[in-house]
Image (cartoon, rainbow, N blue to C red):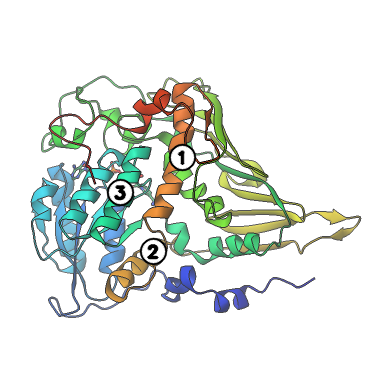
Amino acid sequence: MEKYDRKKFIRKSGGVLAATALVPGVVFSKGALGTANTLNIALVGCRSMGFWILNHALNQPDVVCAALCDVDQNVLERRAGEIEKNFGQKPRLFSDYRKLLEEKDIDAVIIGTPDHWHCLIAVDAMAAGKHVYVEKPMAKTVAECEIMVKASHKYGKKVQVGQQQRSRAHWGEIVKMVQDGKFGKIRTIKTWGNFGYGLGPEKRPDASVPEGVDYNMWLGPSPERPFNPSRFHGSWRFFWDYGGGLLTDWGAHLLDIPLWAMGIDGPPKSVSTVGGIFSGENRDLDMADTQTVIYEFEDFNMTWDHAGGLGVGPYDRNYGVAFVGNNGTAVVNRQGWQIYPEYDGDTPKIEPEKFVWESGDEGHFDHVANFINAIREGETLNCPVEAGNMAAFYSNIGNIAYRSGSTLKWNESGNLIDAGKFSEFITPEYRSPWKLPVI
Ligand SMILES: NC(=O)c1ccc[n+]([C@@H]2O[C@H](COP(=O)([O-])OP(=O)(O)OC[C@H]3O[C@@H](n4cnc5c(N)ncnc54)[C@H](O)[C@@H]3O)[C@@H](O)[C@H]2O)c1
């Protein structure tokens, strides 16, 4: 039995691994500002993830932070100060992204807002001629994702979705092993994510809007309601108006891997789910803190499972993906991968192997590098809109099954049966004056 040769794999792999030739975490010295090669980048939504993506971008050669935008002045000023201190750059500051998009010299926009804004800002940015790095999930509804795919084709802009695993080599290694048949016929794929924060925020009373926050602009297309700190920075993801809970937060990352490995580019035969708020904690969240989703395919099963508040999970990992095949099971997460063989008597059908990713960036740096190389040199994007769309789709339909209390089924042509029954979850109603983009 041939032993799996990691070095050989990396040498042989093109495409998805090409960007990993850049060493993660290396800080490049910056070229002179304003050279012909300068890429002007802007960030909309500066508090957390978007800002770290921006930092990775500014650590690439000749990338300049042209502008920052946030509806919270406190965040905006703090982040502007950090950019000046760490990079010696003074970005223009905006509280309305539409004004930022009018700036002609901006080449690309990073979108680090909550999910309910992704579609609108991404489409407006593309229409304004900007390339887009949009965080995952690509959007919080099926219809918005489809609009983003259409927009990327219409405007011909580069759109990278923030599923950074696609740029971290060891995930691609497992994908290739699955595709090469190393594990034999894949019969079940398990994905799961148990995280402490998945309990949702504490229940808190409505409050006055913090000073410096344009709350109306934070809400944007989502329904009007009084300000509540539990529904705001960071914890918005536990409310249907803004996000999709653990299933979209982590499902967009982890369901992406089997979709990639199995080459899935359409709906399953069906999706069903069970779950509820079972933790017993008095928390504020719309979705289930404990949930299992079953995706039915012709000749294999796929599941998603989460239990917010817990830190233990299958195969001794609190989150991950397991490909279960006739020859063995491959388990992968950000820490590495492990292969558990099946046995013929005492003989393992495949080598028990393990790869531990001991340190370094989880893929963000290379993912951003790939985006910038795609803009500059036409490098293939590791996570284009089609891949972002599929991962968001599988996350979103699990939530639709939960919210509707129904099993969703697709016919052989890939059309959702009784689609009208689910339309309120598929297509969001935007609060006036915001309008769902029409492409
Ligand atoms: N790729 C990853 O591993 C990863 C990790 C964490 C979060 N994310 C994604 O990043 C996105 C942001 O999540 P977060 O945890 O950083 O959220 P956050 O709440 O910490 O930050 C969001 C920021 O966006 C700002 N904002 C809201 N509406 C805005 C608007 N219309 N214009 C400008 N700014 C606006 C908020 O004021 C806030 O500063 C989400 O889509 C999330 O799913 C990805």
Q: Quadrant of residue 55?
A: bottom left
Count residues near mark 1 (Cα–Cα under 10 Å), then give few for <14, some for 14-19, many for 20+. many
Counting from the top left corner in percent of width and height, residue 106 is at 14, 63
Residue in the foreground of this view, choosing between 263 and 87: 263
On screen, residue 103 above or below 231:
below
Q: What residue type is disc 1 on?
A: Ser
Counting from the top left corner in percent of width and height, residue 75 is at 18, 46
Which residue appears at 80% of the width and 70% of the height?
1
**Left or right of residue 105: residue 305:** right
Counting from the top left corner in percent of width and height, residue 134 is at 30, 53
Task: Specify which label sits upstream in the sequence, 2 or 3.
Answer: 3
Q: What residue type is disc 2 on?
A: His
Residue in the foreground of this view, choosing between 292 and 56: 292
What SS does tag 3 mark? helix
Q: Which residue is mark 2?
A: 367
Q: Which residue is mark 1?
A: 395
Which residue appears at 35% of the width and 47% of the height?
138
Whether residue 51 can be seen here: no
What SS does tag 1 mark? helix
Q: Which residue is mark 3?
A: 148
Mark 2 vs mark 1, CA separation in Å: 21 Å
On screen, residue 386 above or below 146:
below
On screen, residue 94 above or below 223:
below
Q: Quadrant of ligand 1?
A: top left
On screen, residue 404 above or below 399:
above
Mark 2 vs mark 3, CA separation in Å: 20 Å
Specify whether tag 2 is near ligand 1 (CB below 8 Å): no
What SS does tag 2 mark? helix
Q: What residue type is disc 3 on?
A: Met
Q: Nearer the viewer, mark 2 or mark 1?
A: 1
Residue in the foreground of this view, choosing between 149 and 159: 149
